[in-house]
Image (cartoon, rainbow, N blue to C red):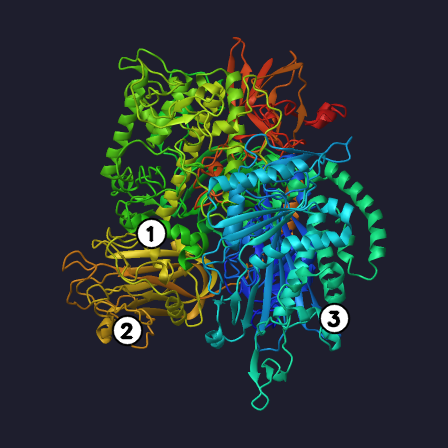
Amino acid sequence: MESPVSGSRDTSVVVITLDTGEVYIIASLSSRSDTQVIYVDPTTGTLRYGGKLGIDVFNSESEALNYVTDGSSWLCRGKTYARAILGYAALGSFALLLVATKLTASIPDLPGGGCIYTVAESQWIKISLQYPQSQGKGEVRNIQELTDLDIDGKHYFCETRDITRPFPSRFPLIEPDDEFVWNGWFSMPFKDIGLPHHCVILLQGFAECRSFGSLGQQEGFVALTARRSRLHPGTRYLARGLNSCYSTGNEVECEQLVWVPRRSGQTVPFNTYIWRRGTIPMWWGAELKLTSAEAEIYVSNRDPYKGSLQYYQRLSNRYDTRNLIGAKKKNSTVPIVCVNLLRSGEGKSESILVQHFVESLNYIRSTRKLQNSRIYLINYDWHANIKYKGEQQTIEGLWRHLKEPTVTVGISDGDYLPSRQRFKDCRGEIISTDDVEGAFCLRSHQNGVIRFNCADSLDRTNAASFFGSLQVFMEQCRRLGISLDSDLAYGYQSSVNDNYGAYTAPLPPGWEKRSDAVTGKIYYIDHNTRSTTWVHPCPDKPWKRFDMTFEEFKRSTILSPVNQLADLFLLAGDIHATLYTGSKAMHSQILSIFNEEAGKFKQFSAAQNVKITLQRRYKNHVVDSSRQKQLEMFLGMRLFKHIPSVALHPLQVQSRPFACFLKPVASMFPSSHGGASLLSFKRKDLIWVCPQAADIVELFIYLGEPCHVCQLLLTVSHGADDSTFPSTVDVRTGPNLDRLKLVLEGATIPQCSHGTNLLIPLPGPISGQDMAVTGAGARLNCQDTSSISLLYDFEELEGQLDFLTRVVAVTFYPATSGRSSMTLGEMEVLGVSLHWRGIFTNEGHGARLYDIAKKSQKETNPFSSVGSDINPFAEASYDNASQLNSSANSPLVDLLTGEITRVDAIQQPVRENINYSGGVDLLDFLDGADIQPSHSHGDFTSPSSQDGKSYLDNGAKQYISCFRSLIGQNSERRLDFAEAMKLEVERLRLNLSAAERDRALLSIGTDPATINPNALIDQSYMGRLCKVANSLALLGQAALEDKTTAAIGLENTDSSKSIDFWNISKIGESFCGSSTCEVHAEIVGATPAPSTSSLFLCCQCQRKACKVCCAGGGALLLSSYDSSGCQSQLDVTTNQSVTMDRVICKTCCHDIVLHALMLDHIRVLISSRRSSRADNAAQKALDQVIGFSKNDRSLPWDPQQAIMVRKHLLNGEESLAEFPFASFLHSVETAPDSAPYLSLLAPLNSEPRHSYWKAPSSASCVEFCIVLGSLSDVSGVLLVISPCGYSTADAPSVQIWASNKINKEERSCVGKWDIKSLISSDSSFHGPENLGRDSKVPRHVKFAFRNPIRCRIIWIMLRLQRPGSASVNLEKDFNLLSLDENPFSQEVKRRASIGGQIETEPCLHAKRILVVGTSVKKEMDIESTQGSDTIKVKAWLERLPQLYRFKIPVEAERLCNNDLVLEQYLPPVSPLLAGFRLDAPSAIKPRVTHSPSLGVDIWDTSITFLEDRYISPAVLHIQVSILQESDNMVTVAEYRLPEAKPGTQMYFDFPQKMQTRRISFKLLGDIAAFADGPAESDNIGFGSSPVATGLSLSNRIKLYYYADPYELGKWASLSAV
């Protein structure tokens, strides 16, 4: 592919697979001069790209290849060369990369430049991932089927121009029309990493061109492009007529472009013609029967014309050019001409469609909603005309019908102007984009469109559109001065032209008419070729061939261009037929009617048609369902059905590539390099041997980027003895070492085979106060926990979310202390990081997050504003201030070194109370759901503030008031299930957590368990209810997808509706208040009072109902549910025609449907609260890095100016300590009115220019411990001075240390510097800085090192000089290095500090800290142990265990409680039980568990991309109980289960060996969060089990005992487990 500017190179893509399994994508685009390296994470499949020169960006492809392979081709397992990237997706266990390996330049040179390429050959590259999350067999099968999607020859793209709109497009390449973009979902990963151009915009259909002319000379080009709409994708019998997205099956936009090639620098004339083809726009279908030759056509008996209006509105919006410059008729309407080619004869199966077609247009006209458009219908029975009149007369009849519409619609004429200096010569609309050097001048515009259809938009449609386009092609050539008259080509005038002697045609572009001065004879000048002629270049009358007969057309026309055009239509017809039916087009011989060998084509076509008919019938029966699934998955549709467990945005592995251990990991062998290999994927088979008899092993991992930590992934590594791997683990996380919090304690690690991947979900830190009132540990009266919470987690504990987590402390414990050395394997920390790069560069998702956070500071905090339209939820963030104050006088112990450190040296920053925000538009489903909190308070603030405390108290009081209104003031009644559910809705509307609810209930003496809806209904009804609610969730998700897709091309698809998706009334308002209501489904007390509320008509009983008596809109999706609970199949396709604007009353709904709506509503509210907490945490993280000051009105840095400033400051070196890659290892004291201390490392343009950090005035010394982004060679440190400047009183002394280890004793002092001497010698550092846009570089001081120092950690200490001290002389040339141990002895006169609170209080302050130097581009080689160490390791690992596991026979076993409880009965004489083996369950955790909210995009759940299942992770536990002699079952152990691939064998040892006759295993935890994968049949209905069958304990548990195999003998060893 050529560069749009220089054409210096073609796009090249190289996919490298290393011998370690790692995959790199090396891309060199034609539009760029550099090469990018994109790393595919081998665990989760996320793409990693940082834009760093020498790591992600290189000058050439060869340089990038050398970097990836270390200059050795032996490291490559595979290498794929490609020409373009078509898409990428990480799909759980696999990642799929689609590349084009061979391209065909189908339209090489468009007017204005640009080439359209057709994908000739493509390749799916399947990448195996190490992510152990469970994935169903059906999902794996569906992913495999996706790779069978037919791409080659049927998809095309342009790398430099927008071709999704009619030529020439008014939009740039990066803003395509979504209707015709087929890889929008597949290109998302590249957009997320800031490389939107690396994945091309792929269109489906046909693109080809031909050159033509007369007398063997090339005079013009004709290009035919056909763009297939993606709004109704599918195969012949699965995608017909309209769908819920207001689009028809096999809908194609065709464009015929003709232009005259010119030399470089000359104007290029062109013209275009657009038409459409597709099936009839109404709800209809065809049922294929084996016993019938033709399919049985039917029209929907319910709202068959629903969506037809929107379909024509979309066409009107697209082809309305009346108001454009150059349009001829400003006040005319937009004509939409429908040419219907169906059989209309009596008895024909298609005649029913013809009748309904007429009725549909009459219906649309009756609505009067298309005032600016006129729809015309031309019924022309193509087959009947061919049969009775023959082909030639059929063509003539079509021309007669098309003449007037074609002339009315017209074509678009224009010129490409290579130089923008010629704009003044344009007499029309000027189209100019950044993608084109020149511009386009459109003199006339096509207004309206002609649309062709038959039953399938295939054979007849292709033929009729060809003959219609042929007449347009003649007119296009005439207007361009290309004569296709056969007699003119031989030098004499056509007799036909004599009839049009009075007509004077306009001159083509570049021509001029003049008269001879002597004779007065008219002649014509061609300025394009600088020639003259006496003959008018276009003497013909426009559209003259419409009036000719077929024979006249054939005799008077040069047929070679006609045959070339026919060839294009033949190819296009085959492409569209193959896409829709799986076979080539039929009845195409008529397109060759102008060919001299037309007879041969006719004979061949008859036999070919029979063959194609058989092919279509076979594929329609056998293959269509699979092809339909492929199309939906490729488009990102119905992913919740096909691959339900796959995350739209996979987690990121933040423990590589630039993570490190803050403290070396101890090893039995000295040559172990401190444990760096434990974080490297390159050593997946590593076995790390810890020192002998270590009781614990504690690891401190510094992450490569700050993130919210979600999971810990462990690779089990051991030798012959699997008991050497740790048995339990604790995890603490925090933004630095001072703020580590426990998130996981005593999690069980089962014994597994070597190389097993175990995934341990990590919740956020949970408040001890919440744990005291909510959850299993807070239950009263030893309540029975046998019931399963299938509805939702009533006792959800909300952990703190922190996107600035940087340090993860992992503590491992052995199975038996001191028995043997522990072995470790690779470990990975998975989380979600904010788009910091986009935040700082104001691009992509980061710009969106930044804007929302900025807006929340200027307004009334939209993240947590109650009652606003953005989000009613906010997180009760943790208040660290109270903790700091309580420990202000206590010493703190350094977790790594054991040192006791003064609190004032590492005190937490003091910050203002800030209102943190939540999500955007999250709670209005489809037509605006009323789920806002009911209280009228303004902003919800942090509980640490007084206002937040008052708010929480008030919310709790309102909750108690609602509770008492249900049970009575004297608690005389108990709540039933429906009332308990409504109370939960009120709790969530009031924005109370489960802990806050329980705390409020306990304050009035009420046990929260008594109102748990999970315990108020029997298990059987709960199971049925969950099945219905789960079905509603899928239907609701499908409805949102369709609504989002339907909005493409339409201005507004929302209809005002008073009843939302759930229609759950508030407590106190849930009774019928209208005397005119005829339903009275909700009656409380006496006769309802008169009301003026709106009434609705029930679509089933036709009675009037008030809003309270109406069911939510979601009930319409469950209208097929009956009282028996039977439904064979759940339709989540786009072919469902459910009318969501209707109303159904509650009496016409089954009770379980109403309960399902309420349950789904609660799940949505819980999800929205979680998303709001995530958005809250994101805004909090931004504030702690950037700091949004409300009073700062200074000018922000201009982006270009910031680049120049950065370039000047670095002076060719790298910035090594820039957030988010670098951070502080300890907290830094910060004044209340200061910018956050993390802003010291943020990019220069990330905050207002007046903002700066300052320490409290009481702090005379502050130490910064900076961990660099990677191991680097540091040459110096730059201190950017605060805008206030320095004085002699607040100019600090600076001391710097460097080290690779955290221990302060091992750090090396680089030097000491004094800034005071600079203040006295340079007056420019005094006073405020000029921050105008003209200032080039901010004031700064550089502390240069004598020699570069290779290190990872830098300590910088700023100290205020005490009175009576002396300063070191600071030279003017900034050569500041000094090693004087005590340079302070002379008394100085103190001056007021601008940063101080009073005149005599100087304080430390700074704007930025920059560490400069060069990063080590490649990780240090991780060497394995060598020599004697290798022998020792091998010998130690091969040491066999003394005891082995053997199976204990079971007499009988019994399953109960949905197979979640397994009881095993043992024989009287059996060995002591040592443990059990559990095979990992096969159930999956689906992404979609409830109906979506209005503000949630189908591909974007929140601004943070943090999914619900990561905010509140689902965890399973297995509880073991045994029968004691007293005949009581006693719980002896409970294990937290990690996630692993299905079937993974996990061994759990009991705390001690025991003897029993009966043992019970019970699966506990978040059972409802798991589901079964897609079944082999794609039917999803109410008949599926409410509990995932993949969780069943049947045949999953085996008991074992330990014994010496030599003592048991040969036969006993066969029972090994």
Mark 3 or mark 2, earlier in chain: 3
Q: Quadrant of the N terminus?
A: bottom right
> Which residue is drawn at the image coordinates 25% and 70% (left, top)?
1325
> Which residue is drawn at the image coordinates 33% and 21% (left, top)?
1074
Name the residue carrying label 2.
1370
Residue 676 visible, this angle:
no
Tell me if mark 3 has few (under 14), some (14-19) or many (20+) residues whose alpha carbon lies within 10 angstroms of its own: some
Q: Position of residue 1096 (x, y in %)?
A: 41, 27
Residue 1471 visible, this angle:
yes
Q: Position of residue 671 (x, y in %)?
A: 57, 53
Left or right: residue 206 versus residue 864 is right
Residue 784 lies in what quarter of the image?
top left
Left or right: residue 110 versus residue 287 is left
Name the residue carrying label 3.
486
Residue 619 lies in what quarter of the image?
top right
Residue situated furthest bottom in the rendering = 518
Q: Quadrant of the C terminus?
A: top right
Query: Distance between the Cα atoms at labels 3 and 1?
Result: 70 Å
Residue 982's place in the image compared with 652, above or below, is above
Type of the residue with mark 1: Lys
Mark 3 or mark 1, earlier in chain: 3
Residue 1319 lies in what quarter of the image?
bottom left
Question: For the residue labelled by badge 1, is the local secondary structure a helix, a strand or a loop?
Answer: helix
Taking depth in this image into account, of 130 and 662 the one nearest to the observer is 130
Give the mark toward the camera: 1 or 2. Answer: 1
Taking depth in this image into account, of 602 and 815 the one nearest to the observer is 602
Tell me if mark 2 has few (under 14), some (14-19) or many (20+) residues whose alpha carbon lies within 10 angstroms of its own: many
Q: Position of residue 303 (x, y in %)?
A: 54, 33
Type of the residue with mark 3: Ser
Residue 209's place in the image compared with 1084, above or below, is below
